[in-house]
Image: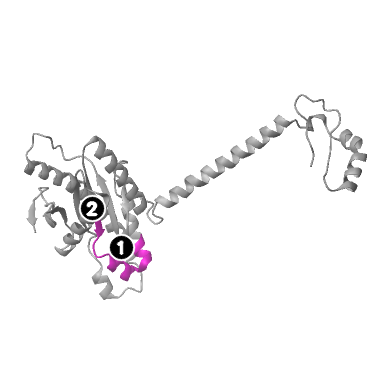
């Protein structure tokens, strides 16, 4: 071990000591003058200089670790196929939103949707083709504070703020109608985008020469989605809204797909309200127990 000088000492001759190695110690001491004469003066390090080097190295290590942590976080919260938020990111985001609104007041709507007849894409075009259809979801438009998340194979969610210009002067029926319009506006945009993108993608997938005529006939003309929505109100937990949205989505599929329903739990029973979009742009609301 080479002992270095304090900053106030004169760098006259280095004091070199190697413990438990007497022969090597003697050899080194005998050549101290020769060693010192061959070293430039500026190489002699003072204690503060060594501390600076150590601090700089530690800082570099810290930056490297922080960079690795950020990259690790990114992988931990993103779906590898679509690069959308994953279930973990969604649940933590919901917890933050609920905690904030419990303190400050307000509400939001939660939507879950599923690609209809998705198994057909996997069966006809193999999983590679199914993945290409799934990746179309990454091209759907969403605001930064309303991110889309992939929580399963072909299942996606979105938090939606705003209530369609509803205000305190509106009665309950008007508020619900405007809230339905807000959800339907978001989902109509997604449906139109998905339809346009899938019409461009499907022909490229059908170019496979090994498709049978039966398989070609089974390819959906359009790619549609079924969705479920729920309005968060004070006191509701994250698990409650996710469960209700999922139940509403499954109900929409049972009713024929390519449509959406709102779910609300009343006295332990779930009620469903359809929020479809007609061709002329009008929304209809029907209650189904």
Q: Which image quarter: residue 210? A: bottom left
**Tag shown at residue 81:** none
Q: How many marks?
A: 2
Q: Which residue is mark 1?
A: 203
Q: In this image, 91 relative to 34: left or right? A: left
Gap between marks 2 and 1 measured at Cα: 41 Å
Whichever of labels 2 and 1 marks the residue nearer the N terminus, that label is 1
Q: Quadrant of the C terminus?
A: bottom left
Q: Position of residue 242 (x, y in %)?
A: 25, 53
- Span colored in magenta: 113-131
Q: Quadrant of the N terminus?
A: top right
Residue 124 sits inside the magenta stretch: yes
Q: Position of residue 46 (x, y in %)?
A: 75, 30
SS for callout 1: helix
Q: Which residue is mark 2?
A: 240
Mark 2 crowdedness (10 Å alpha carbons): few <14, some 14-19, many ≥20: some
At x 34% / y 47%, what residue is drawn?
92
At x 36% / y 72%, what residue is drawn?
209
At x 70% / y 30%, what residue is drawn?
48
At x 40% / y 50%, what residue is drawn?
77
Residue at the front extreme?
A: 20
Is residue 287 among what the camera can see?
yes
SS for callout 2: helix
Disc 2 versus disc 1: nearer the observer? 2
Q: Which image quarter: residue 81? A: bottom left
Residue 91 sits inside the magenta stretch: no
Q: Position of residue 163 (x, y in %)?
A: 17, 40
Is residue 86 among what the camera can see?
no
Q: Main secondary structure of the magenta part?
A: helix
Mark 1 crowdedness (10 Å alpha carbons): few <14, some 14-19, many ≥20: few
Q: In this image, 281 relative to 235: left or right? A: left
């Amino acid at each position: 071990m080479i002992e270095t000088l304090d900053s106030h000492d004169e760098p006259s001759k280095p004091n070199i000591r190697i413990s438990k190695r007497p022969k090597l110690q003697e050899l080194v001491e005998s050549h101290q003058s020769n060693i010192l004469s061959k070293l430039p003066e500026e190489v002699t390090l003072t204690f503060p200089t060594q501390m600076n080097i150590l601090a700089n190295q530690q800082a570099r290590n810290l930056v490297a670790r922080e960079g690795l942590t950020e990259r690790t976080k990114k992988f931990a919260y993103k779906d590898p196929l679509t690069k959308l938020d994953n279930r973990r990111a969604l649940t933590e985001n919901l917890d933050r939103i609920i905690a904030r609104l419990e303190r400050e007041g307000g509400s939001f709507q939660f939507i879950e949707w599923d690609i209809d007849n998705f198994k057909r894409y996997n069966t006809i075009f193999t999983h590679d083709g199914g993945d290409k259809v799934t990746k179309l979801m990454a091209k759907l438009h969403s605001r930064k504070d309303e991110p889309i998340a992939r929580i399963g194979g072909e299942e996606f969610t979105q938090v939606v703020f705003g209530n369609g210009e509803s205000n305190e002067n509106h009665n309950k029926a008007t508020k619900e109608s405007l809230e339905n319009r807000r959800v339907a506006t978001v989902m109509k945009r997604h449906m139109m985008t998905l339809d346009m993108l899938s019409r461009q993608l499907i022909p490229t997938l059908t170019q496979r020469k090994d498709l049978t005529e039966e398989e070609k006939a089974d390819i959906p003309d359009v790619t549609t989605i079924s969705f479920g929505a729920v309005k968060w109100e004070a006191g509701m937990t994250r698990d409650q809204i996710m469960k209700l949205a999922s139940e509403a989505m499954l109900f929409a599929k049972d009713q024929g797909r390519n449509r959406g329903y709102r779910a609300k739990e009343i006295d332990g029973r779930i009620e469903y309200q359809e929020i479809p979009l007609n061709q002329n742009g009008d929304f209809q609301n029907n209650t189904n127990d």
